[in-house]
Amino acid sequence: MRLATLAVSALSVAALSASAAAARDAIRVVGSSTVFPYTQAVAEQFVNNTGAPSPIVESTGTGGGMKIFCAGIGEAHPDVTGASRAMKRSEWDLCISNGVDDISEALIGYDGLSIAISRQNDFDWDLTLGQVYLALAAQVPVNGEWVDNPYRKWSEIDPSLPDVEILAFGPPPTSGTRDAFVELAMHAGCEELDYVKNGGFDSKWVKENCSRMRTDGPFVEAGENDNLIVQRLEADPHAIGIFGYSFLYENLDRLKPVNIEGVEPSLETIADKSYPISRPLYIYVKNPHRGVIPYLEEFIEEYMSEEALGPDGYLAERGLVTLPDDLRAEVQDRVLNAEPMEPPAE
């Protein structure tokens, strides 16, 4: 079986070599909207250093990027995908089924999931995860019953909150930001509620009942372009937006953070995990494309460089929370040597 797999892989690489040389000379990257600006920054530096054609970097969302990345080997398929969560086993299985069986995984750093509001809004926002859940979930407890969410104003959740309509712009289901927000904010917020704590409900119940965002108006799926969310927040000072910390970091002149559980998102609070909604960021590299797609190896070297990933690197200047020195060195060594990743857990 192993010999057959190697034979198929060899044929795939041979086909890739023949087609890629004639078909494209630009590196192609897809994936997470949160990882997108970091990859763009690496692409710009890479072009400045090498004079190579500009990589094509697309913001498709983590889930969408995985589907495209795992569709096959060859010039028609991307070389790299960004992800705001680790690859799922189902995505790994899709890759394997399409012959994408040699992938390097790079944890590039950490990011906080920020909730932000326009600087025109003068309220001192500080929400618990329970309040976030009650505002945005499809179903909530009311008078001891689990019902469709009736709350329309923040003040209905807590009288100390503003008497304004709930309106939140957030990521769609294809986004890794959405996956992470559901897991880190919605599930955790649901678990804070007395109905859940006192009801003896386990994590399986929480996952089954607390994962759906409401679809009756207060939560609006704003697509994969986080810049559009920033524009909408400026247009409506009472609306909140949900996106990666890097977008808040880059727009602090126009937006301000909503504190969560009394903690403001920052490079320091995300790094020390005191900010409760933080997550890892990844890129995945299709190793059979190395040495075939022009300049891909040099692009990966730039991405893994200290100038990019280090604590004083240009990605940190854009809001990436960098890895500890020992972990970063381990990741760099593994990816530069094209070591294949282990299959994700079931």
Image (cartoon, grey):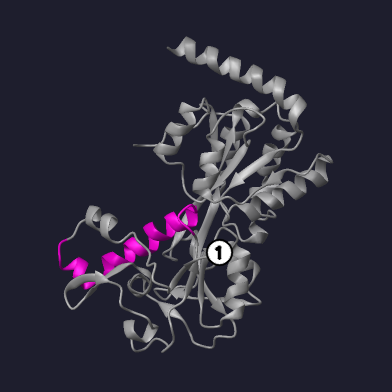
Residue bearing mark 1: 245
Most foreground residue, 328 or 173: 173
Most foreground residue, 17 or 23: 23
Q: Main secondary structure of the magenta part?
A: helix
> Residue at horizontal 20%, vertical 56%?
202
Q: Is residue 72 left or right of residue 52?
A: left
The kind of residue on which mark 1 rests is: Tyr
Residue 107 can be seen in this image: no
Position of 340 relative to 196 (above/below): above
Q: Quadrant of residue 191?
A: bottom left
> Residue at horizontal 46%, vertical 41%?
87
Q: Quadrant of residue 13?
A: top right
Position of 288 relative to 320 (above/below): above
Q: Quadrant of residue 92?
A: top left
Confirm whether the magenta stretch covers residue 174: yes
Residue 83 can be seen in this image: yes
Confirm whether the magenta stretch covers residue 132: no
* Quadrant into which the N terminus falls: top left
**Where does the image place residue 130, in percent across and percent down from the top left?**
32, 72
User: Which residue is situated farthest in the top direction here?
Assistant: 3
Most foreground residue, 255 or 317: 255
Most foreground residue, 336 or 59: 59
User: Which residue is situated farthest in the right direction here?
Assistant: 51
Q: Please, what secondary structure does the residue beneath circle 1 have?
A: helix
**Where does the image place residue 325, in percent across and percent down from the top left?**
57, 47
Position of 282 relative to 209 (above/below): above
> Residue at horizontal 60%, vertical 29%?
287
Q: Is residue 326 left or right of residue 17?
A: left
Magenta span of residues = 172-200
Total residue callouts:
1
**Where does the image place residue 51, in percent across and percent down from the top left?**
84, 41
User: Which residue is situated farthest in the front direction here?
Assistant: 216
